[in-house]
Amino acid sequence: MPKKIDEELKARAVRLVGDHRGEYSSLTAAAAVVAKQLGVGKESVRRWAVQAEVDSGQRQGPTSEELAEIKALKNKVRCRLP
């Protein structure tokens, strides 16, 4: 089971990636550096940064709110199945 990461740490990681993204060739490279500094997985940091871009409208995709709604609906349907 994945460990629960503090929301403040996620926000800090996303902010650092955004602040330093111009210094690196890609989002992935910036996320790797930030992840190493904070002691978390580089793919996790990259995914948080991408989701932050989606939530702010800079990138296409389902927002965090929409993903939470989809998850809740799936759970509701799952509970009704025999």
Image (cartoon, helix red, strand yellow):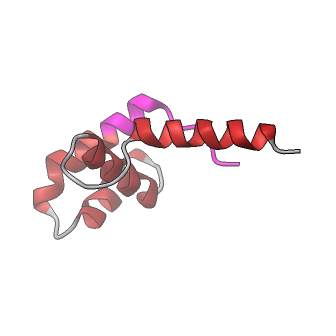
Residue that protrudes farthest toward the bottom in the picture: 25
Question: Residue at (11%, 60%) from the top-left corner?
Answer: 23
Q: Is residue 42 visible?
A: yes
Q: Is residue 5 magenta?
A: yes
Question: Residue at (49%, 32%) from the top-left corner?
Answer: 6
Between residue 42 and residue 49, name the one nearer to us. 49
Between residue 23 and residue 73, name the one nearer to us. 73
Residue 36 is situated, as x and y percent measured from the top left of the image, at: 39, 55
Residue 13 is situated, as x and y percent measured from the top left of the image, at: 33, 43
Question: Residue at (61%, 38%) from the top-left corner?
Answer: 73
Residue 81 is situated, as x and y percent measured from the top left of the image, at: 82, 44
Image position of 29 (left or right of 43): left
Residue that protrudes farthest toward the left in the picture: 22
Q: Is residue 78 magenta?
A: no
Image position of 81 (left or right of 16): right
Question: Residue at (54%, 42%) from the top-left corner?
Answer: 70
Q: Is residue 36 visible?
A: no
Between residue 10 and residue 39, name the one nearer to us. 10
Give the total number of marks visible in the rendering. 0
Residue 57 is situated, as x and y percent measured from the top left of the image, at: 21, 45
Q: Which residues are magenta?
A: 1-12
**The image quarter in which residue 79 lies:** top right
Q: Quadrant of the C terminus?
A: top right
Q: Is 58 situated above or below 7?
A: below
